[in-house]
Amino acid sequence: MQIFLDSTDTKQIRELAATGLVDGVTTNPSLIAKAGRPMLEVIAEICDIVEGPISAESVATDHKTMIEEGKKLAAVASNVVVKLPLTKDGLIACAELAREGINVNVTLCFSAVQALLAAKAGAAYISPFIGRLDDHGADGVGLIGDIRQIYDNYGYDTEILAASIRTAEHVRGSALAGADCATIPPDVFATLFKHPLTDKGLDQFLSDWAKTGQSIL
Ligand code: E4P
């Protein structure tokens, strides 16, 4: 499963990309607002740090303007993926941008039939928001499984990008349900390395090793 960072914090992205485990980055208008810098500048910087797909979201609500914004965003760097909301206009714009060879990530997906429509519109990625669905009392990870089955039934190659991830458990559930990628906030990414038994086991190994008085180097 590919791991994307859901962030516009370029310092943090740079640090985490150095692990070699980061395949891409997603952003959204709220994260751009949080960065407090011009959007195109932030996107260009992220595209320089991470070679993989970098999602940059249109803020238009009509398909004509979405297409114009999408083309402008795609021109920032060759690895930009244009992010569009799962609305009727969003899917019209998705189909047009896809026809022109621009990769689209359809975002704000909350149902399997929405995901089906996005695949039909030629989306490169579909972003089901599993955390927000759970907040709403629904089954976010269950949606990933439903979309996986539908895409496999019909051979759609749209990649399932699990989004709105809040916990390591969401990452586990998404991977088991067959998500192609998960976009993860940096603080959640940091928790993925951790297990209390790893810390405990390492402490024990190091203390036993110290008793030997040996050194490997
Ligand atoms: C997805 O691409 C979005 O940027 C993001 O995952 C939304 O997450 P949130 O529900 O934590 O805002």
Image (cartoon, rainbow, N blue to C red):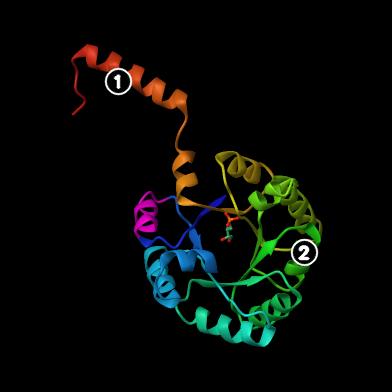
Seen at 49% across and 63% down, the residue is 31
Q: Is residue 27 visible?
A: no
Q: Position of residue 81 (x, y in %)?
A: 55, 71
Label 2 sits on residue: 114
Q: Which mark is residue 76?
A: none
Mark 2 element type = helix
Image side of residue 14 versus residue 196, left or right? left
Image side of residue 169 versus residue 143, left or right? left
Image side of residue 216 versus residue 104, left or right? left
Dot 2 or dot 1, earlier in sequence: 2
Seen at 37% across and 55% down, the residue is 12
Mark 1 element type = helix
Instruction: Give the amino acid type for the residue marked by disc 1 in the picture.
Output: Leu
Q: Is residue 101 visible?
A: yes
Q: Does residue 14 show up magenta in the picture?
A: yes
Q: Position of residue 36 (x, y in %)?
A: 41, 69
The region drawn magenta spans 11-20
Q: Main secondary structure of the magenta part?
A: helix
Query: How many numbered marks have been drawn onto this rendered protein structure?
Result: 2
Q: Does residue 177 show up magenta in the picture?
A: no
Q: CA distance from mark 2 to mark 1?
A: 52 Å
Quick one: 122 or 10, which is closer to the camera? 10
Seen at 73% across and 53% down, the residue is 148
Instruction: Give the amino acid type for the residue marked by disc 2 in the picture.
Output: Gln
Q: Which mark is residue 206?
A: 1
Which quadrant holds the C terminus?
top left
Q: Position of residue 78 (x, y in %)?
A: 47, 76
